[in-house]
Amino acid sequence: MIKYVCKYTPVELFSGFSQECSLLDEVADNFEVSERASHINLCGFGKALMESTLSEDTQELILINCCDTMNRAYDVIDDTKACDFLFMLDLPHQNSDSAAQELGKRLLRLKNEYAASSGIPFDKEAFLNAFAPTAPSESEPYVGILGVRVGKQLEETISSLMPLPVRNLTCVSNREFTCDTKAMADMSEEDMFTAYAVALLSQFPCGRMGMPEIRCKLFDDKNLKGIIYHSIKFCDYYEFEYVGFKRDTTLPILKLETDYTRQSEGQLRTRIQAFAETLSGAADTNQVVAKVPTPANTSYVAGIDSGSASTDVVIMDTAENIISTVIAPTGGGANNSAEQALSDALSKAALSRSDIRVIVKTGYGRDYIADGDDSVTEITCHAAGAHFLSAQARTVIDIGGQDSKVIRIDETGAVQNFVMNDKCAAGTGRFLEMMARALGLTLEQISEIGLDWEEDITISSMCTVFAESEVVSLVAQNKALEDIVHGLNSSVASKVGGLVNRVSPQEGYIMTGGVAKNRGVVKALEDKLETNLYICEHAQLCGAIGAALFALERA
Amino acid sequence: MDREEQVEKFGQLIQKAVLEDPVKARKILINACRIQQAGSVLPSSKVSPSHRYASRQITATMVDALSSPEKSAMVSIFIPSEPLNVAGITPFSVEALSGFLGGVHAEQVFLDAAEEDGASKTLCSFHRIFHGAMGSGVVPNPKMLIYTNLACDANMTSFPYLINRFKIPSFFVEVPYERSEDAVQHVAGQLREMVTFISDVSGKKITDNMLQEAMQRSHRTSEYYLEHLKYQADHAMKSDIASELYAVFTGHIMMGTKKAETYARRMLSDIKKAKGNDAIRLVWLHMIPFLQPSANKYLSFTDRARIVACDLVYDSMMHIDPTNPYEAMAHRMVYSCYNGDYKLRAQRAQQVAEQTKADGIVVFAHWGCKGTLGASALFKRDFEEAGYPTLILDGDGGDPANCSDGQMATRFGAYLEMLEDRR
């Protein structure tokens, strides 16, 4: 079995040796082996490739010099002599006559080297018979996964959550080309491999091939209804393309970045579900977010927002009056915290569980709460909650304990666009919490102290760990606490301001989440955005309010 | 206010101006460059005359790029610059421009602009600064853009993006992975087309004779540099952390000019006159983190440690045949130690370490540079087997926020203590 990683690999060639080829596309559990053999800051796929090749039995491997990571993966694998046959095929970046001629020579060399290595004679007829006709694509609306490879597991997750069929159009997929095998049969070996090279290069190009003008044609397909754009951390090839795609298309687009491991599943699911909800909303124009249904038999509903720092509960009556609220620290698991918070909210309102007709759950812990009738992502809930809190709200800035997100909504509270921070804690409540601890301050103190600053200190490190050491160093330099805290507030504002600018923000800013209580951050953010942020009494309850509104719809 | 504080204040001034009026920010930068060229803020006399000369020439290149975009070309640093220089077009690279903006502490506003535009934080910071500088309007659109796949993936993403966004006439040179004479001929053919492209876009005729003369200058530049390496073991020029960076840029974007030749000739003269010292001698792989205070502490104006050679410099300094300019330029690309597998780069580093009697080799694991990061463990093993203690120094040459200076100080300091112990 010959393993390969890229759609430009000449898999048909190996039929001439009666060998089967298999795509190496495994997502890794961890990068223990590869990071020891190479470096941590490499593309996750390259590390996953090293991980599987160095840990498992891969006897024959064909690599393509797709990128610098792949070049170095080749060096590492070659160094270990882990493979009986290892070949790096030099793939041109252009589709031209001279590029095809060069590639043709390299294909011929590959054929000769494999024949010498395996001792198997090359069967030209078997090679030419291996070219399968391409099946035409089905004509139906679909969601496209674009960008870099996603791995089977994530593709399955996306497919299971999307309201439309999903087509994988990432770098390694979409392998379609035609060959005139009859003509090739009569050619010299050199000409035959050049013709093969021409065909391989004629495929729809991956992002590495540097043909943005051709890749933009993906949008021409009227059946494409939404894009999930995947990139892998430290993969350079797809970031700029995403920027261009986002600018040039009016289609809904969701960016996902992974490190090609099974981690971050929770946050990815949230984003994918929220995107699916956006697509469903776009398809179903009758859906009205946060509209009062006023059922005949008045009763109550509840929304539970299970966050990393707090679990929030809102009980609402059918006239959208907030009857009871609870903000409780999340501890002892999402389910226990939710049960306790709901019980407390019911007690406050002198209600019992049977008075609640519908419960909708949201937040990271939503899938771990046993009670409840439905769950909706916190993106959609925050959008509905923000609209409820202010009908003028158009740009929602939510900074919670674990993540920060910016959501742009329309006049009905429907999500138009959203972005979230990456896995890094920078720009989140957790960042401020850790900095407060480093400074020996409480969260209440850190929210006030930065307002009276004198020296404009820049905290350049956005990484929480580095920022902590920078803060300790500033304390050692006898810098005023007020100035350090102001520097921290500005760094959070800078990070979140960057997110805001990525959603094409509109006036009508509302800030929600626990950090909305931090006056210093609010001021720094207002300065950064040169606008006022609307912050209301229920800012921290925005997600739970949205969930309660959705519960009303279902009541 | 000391010099460092002055630069810090100047950086803040630039960053403020970028947000308010990018054209004004550009003018401030140009004026600051001209003041530096005139000598009022020159590096101190602790730096050898040849390095000071190079500093002024690099600054002049930045002035040309910013003030005369119609006579400038944005290039990958590995593109042969001789055809541009003889046509009177000033080539400037991502590394030179971003390094310059970092040098005046103005990088953050451009990094922020690039991030707001969607550029990944894991992309090489030099490319992110450059992206931000172009996108913000501080750097005007050049006359043309020429790039290559050699050495750096970031070139293959940011250049096509900028070409597409700003509609700049462009040319691409593909360097095969394999080092062979066949590959040299393939690249030479592309370089002939590149010269035609430069002539067409600039309206300047480039004759074979002009190219041969430029290659003669490059040949002499390389020979002076290679000769100077022989003295590095026992002669210590006065230098700071940026000195070797000047050589990086003169050895690439200024190749083929009289200025580059003058610099190399003066450097040879300077080193011959210089006395030896007991400083730890280091061969350095990849960029030099000149923005990190800790690296400055150990490498600027000190007798404790010095860089005797950097692979970004000696890579371009080869024995070439100037009578065949296209083949000579192609040979330099194909046989670059940054091309193909890691082995040639490792071999060259060991050869230079032996020649310069280096105490150790530092592999600077520049954030985002997968070509260097991916081979770092192999480099370390090979170098240490050859008897050269090796430090893999994680950091970021363009964005100091990406690494902890305290950690860098500890690692670099401990490495020097270890080398001092071994003597």
Image (cartoon, coloured by chain):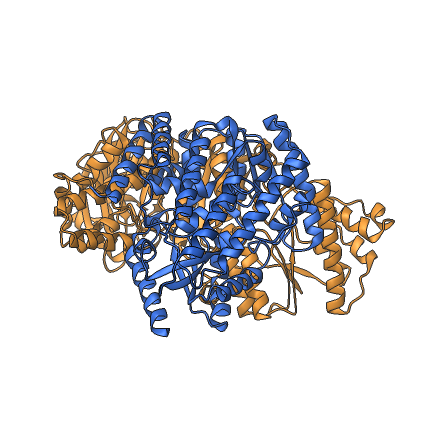
Residue A515: x %, y % from top left = 22, 43
The residue at the point 70 percent across, 42 percent down is: B189
Give A541 or A178, whichever is nearer the viewer: A178
Q: Which residue ends up furthest to the front in the rendered image?
A: B273
Q: Which residue ends up furthest to the right in the rendered image?
A: A186
Query: Would residue A544 be seen by someone viewing this image from the given angle?
Result: no
Give A257 or B313, whichever is nearer the viewer: B313
Residue A414's quadrant in the figure? top left
Residue A465: x %, y % from top left = 28, 55
The residue at the point 57 percent across, 63 percent down is: B343
Q: Is residue A119 left or right of residue B335?
A: right
Give B357 or B25, whichever is nearer the viewer: B357
Give B328 or A77, whichever is nearer the viewer: B328
Query: Would residue B216 be seen by someone viewing this image from the given angle?
Result: yes
Q: Is residue A410 left or right of residue A520?
A: right
Q: Is residue B100 left or right of residue A168?
A: left
The image quadrant where one finds the N terminus of chain A is bottom right
Residue A491: x %, y % from top left = 26, 43
Residue A97: x %, y % from top left = 73, 41
The image quadrant where one finds the C terminus of chain A is top left
Q: Is residue B95 left or right of residue B6?
A: right
The residue at the point 45 percent across, 28 percent down is: B140
Residue A298's quadrant in the figure? top left
With respect to residue B343, does A403 lie above or below?
above
Which chain shows up in blue? B
The residue at the point 70 percent across, 62 percent down is: A20
Tell me the shade of chain A.
orange
